[in-house]
Amino acid sequence: MKTTKISFFILSLMLLLMSSLSGWAGNAAAASDSGKTYVIGTDIVFAPFEYEDENGNYVGIDIDLLDAIAKDQNFKYQIKSLGFNAAVQALEANQVDGVIAGMSITDERKAKFDFSEPYYDSGVVMGISANNDTVKSYEDLRGKKVAVKTGTEGYSFAESIASKYGFTIVPFDESYQMYDDVMTGNSVACFEDEPVLRYGVKQNNGLKIVTDKEDGASYGFAVSKGKNQELLEMFNAGLVNIKANGEYKRIIEEYVGENAQVANLGRWELIQKSLPSLLKGLGKTLLYTIVSLFFAFIIGLIFGFMKVGQNKFLRVVATVFVDIFRGIPLIVLAFFIYFGIPQAMGFTMPLFLAAILTLSLNAGAYVTEIIRGGIQSIDRGQMEAARSLGIPYRKAMIKIVIPQAVRVMIPSFINQMVITLKDTSILSVIGLVELTQSGKIVIARTFSSFDIWLTVAVMYLIVIITLTKIADYLEVKIRRG
Ligand code: GLN
């Protein structure tokens, strides 16, 4: 009776957690009362086109244009900030209905996507550190490294001239990472879209622009070729309307006009301002850790007992499970579950589900081994003695072997808890907003890597040390009890 009550309680807790998690899946939805909700993929940070402002709101030219057009055309949408390369992949895999991400309309892309009318002019420029006076043109790049962002027009441009000017390409996923690479001197230059780098320079990202804009493509809103044509038509019609009624101009002015805001915070002020969003990220890190460990524990119990059991078939199944999920790097597993499986099977995987699956399967494999190791560490003689006294296998296991095994397992469990908590950070690659991702988002806006990464590291340390201390205390109590 008691156990049913407890499991009921745990189940309700899980449902509660899951429902709050699912609420995070999207960022915004325009108000409208009819029709389908279009899922629109975008970059995580590509200011002034999309980024998170000081108050944690997702803003930018793209975001505001889409919102104004959706209101004008009366359609509903949901933003998914995936990162540029991931958003384009998601569109290709039909995981999203459209992409707005400062996406250049190029001939190559036109083969796969249908674009709206262009809504903003762009083109690639070369950026170098503001204190570098030696690099002035592409000729000065010979023998040096150049940072680029994967899947972008800047990348293709760098690739097209790399052998002519003799430089090597260093790829990054996010714009701020390539700026950092230039600032630290690993790369001597980066290639970035002119409006974005100009905005960054104005926000004191430490770089300067040294070349004229390459003839580049303009930005367009994209859908998969031949798909969601009604959405594309609405976008085009809405764009015409907001240009006519002055809304378009107002949005552009707000971000890149004369009076656009320049953030100029002191270091403390910056950390203070960032704390709320970092703390929110930390909360999610903890939640993801707890939920995944819960499932990992269930998985571990099932496979752990299969591994020490008497049935050969079950033993093999459990061994294969551990080999697979312990063997695949977490980041590969995350990509496979979030992008791979849905693409192959033609469905959309919610982000929180992908995250929990990845973490629980990985941690589950380790917990399986902890449980197996714990049980096998108890001398066989004890089981044999119990059986010879006429105690049945199950009872001997529950009363004699398991209580001792649990004590052996506790330190490894604590270890696994710390590892899983840290591993949640890897899921930032699929756009999961937890502590590390929150840090990335703040840095992308403020360009202060040192202060923010230090704050993030300290936050992880405080939580991990506190949890370990609590666990140590409990361990002592259990050993005594
Ligand atoms: N305009 C570039 C492209 O389309 C970069 C876009 C981005 O990084 N968000 O490739």
Image (tube, helix red, strand yellow):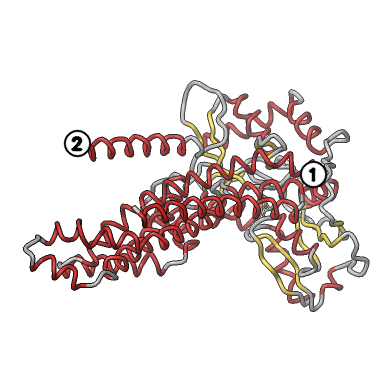
> Up-down: is 169 above or below 336?
below
Residue at x 37%, y 39% (from the top left corner): 14
Residue 320: where, in percent of width, then height?
A: 29, 68
Amino acid type of disc 1?
A: Trp
The residue tagged with tag 1: helix, strand or loop?
helix
Can you name the residue that lies furthest to the left here? 390
Residue displayed at 49% across by 21% down: 33
Please name the residue shown 44% across and 47% down the image.
290
Q: Amino acid at mark 2?
A: Met
What's the distance in space between the residues labelled 1 and 2, CA to CA? 55 Å
Answer with the quarter of the image where residue 262 lies. top right
Nearest the camera: 11 or 147? Answer: 11
Residue with the most extreme right position: 133
**Element class at badge 2:** loop
Q: Who comes first in sequence, dot 1 or dot 2?
A: 2
Question: Residue 268's spot in the image, x, y percent?
Answer: 79, 44
Q: Position of residue 255 (x, y in %)?
A: 78, 37
The location of residue 448, given as percent across then percent down, is: 77, 52
Of residue 433 and residue 301, the one placed in the foreground of this image is 301
Q: Is residue 106 left or right of residue 399?
A: right
Where is mark 1, residue-wise? 268
Mark 2, residue position: 1
Q: What is the residue that sits farthest to the front in this orientation? A: 480
Q: Which mark is residue 82?
A: none
Q: Quick one: which residue is furthest to the top in this view?
A: 33
**Badge 1: residue crowd in 10 Å (few <14, some 14–19, many ≥20):** few
